[in-house]
Structure formats: structure tokens, C-alpha cells
């Protein structure tokens, strides 16, 4: 996607051939800055501190982390240590585990002398595949959007999304936002309600930034407004991304997703989840078994933003000393999900549905 006319991915190899560049998402939407990562530890830190975030991008960054580790020490021990170290960075998005396993499998039987080059190429392949996968998710989702728009001619298709499942969460395009971009580009009249997504505000800071940059009509809403808008007929369709889908179709996504799915169900509004197959955890059969990341309480008690003088500041919004809890994700049971939009097409949110599209994974 483009930032002020210049095409960007969220992650790319630096020209020195031994480090990577990423968009620093902690600075958005106020400052567009990139960050250079030259060591495995720096990639781990970027994932942990959410300089990069979003399930597919976390996986892609970790893949490059393995490559950077191999540049320093290509032994089996270093490979295992880098795998284990990176795996600890964030617990919920399963794309991390998927990418690390793929890197280790591809490198394990290669001679040590080849490992850095092979790892670098494999990480680049993961990034390229992610772009193509998201493009395909977009084309399959576009069919759904076309049909939904056709049902309501003469007025915009109103879509609600939660968190950021756009190109910033992936390498390019995004998952849930890919069909939105494609529908907008082909002239479908649409409008997006963007949940702000407290506490880290990925909706207000990132999704709105993306949509605005692409010229997609949208409005940021408080997380609590979606239910009212659904009852008022102001939402035609919900679409979200996901950090992990279990084999039975349960969906872990950013905290607050479950409440939107409940409200959508109560109002007969389709609730779609867009995902690459790397987000399916075939080893789990129940969403309640997904590890839910508990993040710092200060994300709830404090907020950051831009001051009138242009400076960025963090302020406390709670009474000093008030404790806070901060689960990063919740689980939406498969029965609340209308369908999955994947790179291979759309399927019911069931084991049979997923297996129908991915029989041999
Ligand atoms: O904590 P984050 O920002 O890494 O959260 C992950 C996400 O971006 C969302 O949960 C998203 O909806 C799924 S990832 C495409």
C-alpha cells in the first residue's frame, strides 16, 4: 500500500543485505518512521514492544529474526535457541509458531555454511506469500461485499471492523481490510465503522490511518457504540481478522471482538473472520485452550497521544493506584461466526469447513 504516494510493505530487507527495515507502528498515526533491525534480539524486541504487530507480520518478523541469528551463528544450537527465544515474544498469535517451525524445518538439514542465505530467502518467501495470500483473501471477500452491496442499492454498505487487520498487521493488503480496499477500488459505495479498540487503540491509530490513506470513507467509534449502531440498522456486515483459529472454528482476536460477535448475532448481521491458513491451529479443538496474552496494566490506566504543540505525551487517565487488568485477546465461539474468508475461499466456521478447504494441512 502507499504512504503519501510511495508504495510500502511493513517489512523489507535493508540494502546492506544483513538487516531489515520495519515501519515503527508505535509512532503511528502521528509520525511515520521506520526502524532498522540488525540482530535476532532486536527483532524479538520489536515484536514484544509492538513496533511490529498483527499475527501475520509477527510471523514474518520472527522469520527474519531466525535469519539474523543464523548470520551470527549457524549451529543447530543457535537455531534452536533463536526459535525458542522468538517463540516467547508473544503468546496468542499462532503465526509466530508457524513461521518459526517453517524456518527451523527448512534450515535443519542444510549445511551450516548455507544457512544464513537459505534463511534470508525463506523469510523473504514467507513475506511474498503473505502478500499473495492476503490478496486472495481480498478477492474472496470482495464477492461477499458485492453481494451485500447489491442487497442495498442506493446507499453505502456499512461495515464494522475491530482492531487492525489491515496491511499494517500483515506484509501488505491485510486480511479483513483487503476486501474493503478492493471493494472501494472497484467503486462499491462503502463506509467503515472503525472500533477504536481500547486499550492500545489499533483501530483509531492504525485502521483509521490506513483507510484514510487509501481514501476509504470511515468513522472511528468508541468500542461501546457498535451495539447501538447494529440495532439502529447502521451496520450491514462485520469483518475482523484473527490471531488464532482452532480446528473447530473458535476465533481468538483482539479483546472486544466477542462482544461485537454477540451483538451481530442478536441483530442478524453477518460476522465474517478473514484469515490466512497460517492462523489455523490444528493442534487445538477448543478456543478456551488458546493462551491469552495479559499485557501491562499501564495500557489501561494511561493513554498516549499528540499534544496541541505537536509533542507526543502519555497521560494517566485513572486514579493513582487503581489496579487494572488487561487481557489482550478474547475468544469468539465458532457458532457466532458466519464464515471464514481464507486464501482458498470462504467456508463455514467449523472443522468440516476448514478441512474442506485445507484437507492435507
Ligand atoms: O496485539 P496486536 O495489535 O498484535 O493484535 C493483533 C491484531 O492485529 C488483531 O487482533 C487483528 O485483528 C488480527 S491480526 C490480522
Image (cartoon, rainbow, N blue to C red):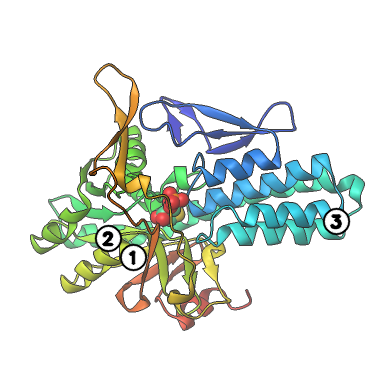
- Per the model, the C-alpha gap separating discs 2 and 3 is 45 Å
The x and y percentages for residue 166 are 41, 47
Q: Secondary structure at mark 2?
A: strand
Q: Are marks 1 and 2 in contact (CB under 8 Å)?
A: yes
Residue ID for mark 2: 238
Residue appearing at x 38%, y 59% in the figure: 327
Instruction: Characterize the local packing of mark 3: few (<14), some (14-19) or many (20 or more) Cα atoms within 10 angstroms.
Output: some
Instruction: Please report whichever mark, 1 or 2, sits nearer to the chain's N-terminal start.
Output: 2
Which is more toward the observer, 272 or 200? 200
Residue ID for mark 1: 272
- Per the model, the C-alpha gap separating discs 1 and 2 is 6 Å
User: Is 132 above or below relative to 3?
Assistant: below
Residue 262 visible: yes
Residue ID for mark 3: 76
The x and y percentages for residue 292 are 45, 64
Q: Are marks 1 and 3 in contact (CB under 8 Å)?
A: no
User: Mark 1 against mark 3, which lies toward the viewer?
Assistant: 3
- Per the model, the C-alpha gap separating discs 1 and 3 is 42 Å
Q: Quadrant of residue 95?
A: bottom right
Instruction: Please report whichever mark, 1 or 3, sits nearer to the chain's N-terminal start.
Output: 3
Residue appearing at x 68%, y 45% in the figure: 65
Residue 138 visible: no
Q: Secondary structure at mark 1?
A: strand
Which is more toward the observer, 13 or 44? 44
Q: Are marks 2 and 3 in contact (CB under 8 Å)?
A: no
Q: Residue furthest top?
A: 309
Residue appearing at x 16%, y 61% in the figure: 227
Amino acid at each position: 500500500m502507499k504512504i503519501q504516494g510511495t508504495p510500502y510493505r511493513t517489512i523489507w530487507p535493508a540494502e546492506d543485505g544483513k538487516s531489515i527495515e520495519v515501519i515503527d507502528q508505535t509512532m503511528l498515526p502521528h509520525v511515520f518512521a521506520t526502524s532498522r533491525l540488525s540482530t535476532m534480539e532486536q527483532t524479538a524486541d520489536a515484536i514484544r514492544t509492538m513496533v511490529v504487530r498483527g499475527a501475520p507480520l509477527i510471523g514474518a518478523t520472527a522469520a527474519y529474526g531466525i535469519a539474523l541469528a543464523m548470520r551470527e551463528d549457524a549451529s543447530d544450537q543457535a537455531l534452536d535457541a533463536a526459535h525458542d527465544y522468538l517463540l516467547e515474544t508473544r503468546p496468542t498469535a499462532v503465526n509466530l509458531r508457524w513461521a518459526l517451525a517453517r524456518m527451523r524445518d527448512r534450515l535443519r538439514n542444510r549445511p551450516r555454511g548455507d544457512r544464513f542465505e537459505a534463511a534470508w530467502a525463506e523469510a523473504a518467501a514467507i513475506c511474498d506469500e503473505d502478500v499473495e495470500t492476503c490478496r486472495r483473501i481480498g478477492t474472496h471477500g470482495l464477492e461477499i461485499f458485492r453481494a451485500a452491496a447489491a442487497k442495498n442499492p442506493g446507499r453505502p454498505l456499512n461495515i464494522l471492523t475491530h482492531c487492525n487487520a489491515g496491511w499494517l498487521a500483515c506484509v501488505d493488503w491485510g486480511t479483513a481490510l483487503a476486501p474493503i480496499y478492493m471493494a472501494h477500488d472497484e467503486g462499491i459505495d462503502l463506509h467503515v465503522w472503525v472500533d477504536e479498540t481500547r486499550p492500545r487503540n489499533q483501530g483509531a491509530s492504525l485502521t483509521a490511518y490506513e483507510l484514510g490513506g487509501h481514501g476509504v470513507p470511515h468513522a472511528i467509534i468508541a468500542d461501546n457504540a457498535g451495539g447501538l449502531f447494529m440495532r439502529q440498522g447502521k451496520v450491514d456486515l462485520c469483518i475482523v481478522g484473527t490471531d488464532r483459529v482452532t480446528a473447530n472454528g473458535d476465533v481468538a482476536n483482539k479483546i472486544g471482538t466477542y462482544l461485537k460477535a454477540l451483538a451481530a448475532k442478536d441483530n442478524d448481521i453477518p460476522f465474517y473472520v478473514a484469515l490466512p491458513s497460517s492462523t489455523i491451529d490444528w493442534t487445538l479443538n477448543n478456543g478456551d485452550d488458546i493462551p491469552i496474552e495479559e499485557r501491562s496494566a499501564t495500557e489501561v490506566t494511561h493513554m498516549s497521544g499528540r499534544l496541541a504543540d505537536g509533542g507526543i505525551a502519555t497521560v494517566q487517565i485513572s486514579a493513582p493506584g487503581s489496579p487494572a487488568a488487561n487481557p489482550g485477546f478474547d475468544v469468539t465461539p465458532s457458532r457466532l461466526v458466519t464464515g471464514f474468508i481464507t486464501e482458498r475461499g470462504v467456508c463455514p466456521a467449523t472443522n468440516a469447513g476448514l478441512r474442506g478447504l485445507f484437507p492435507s494441512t
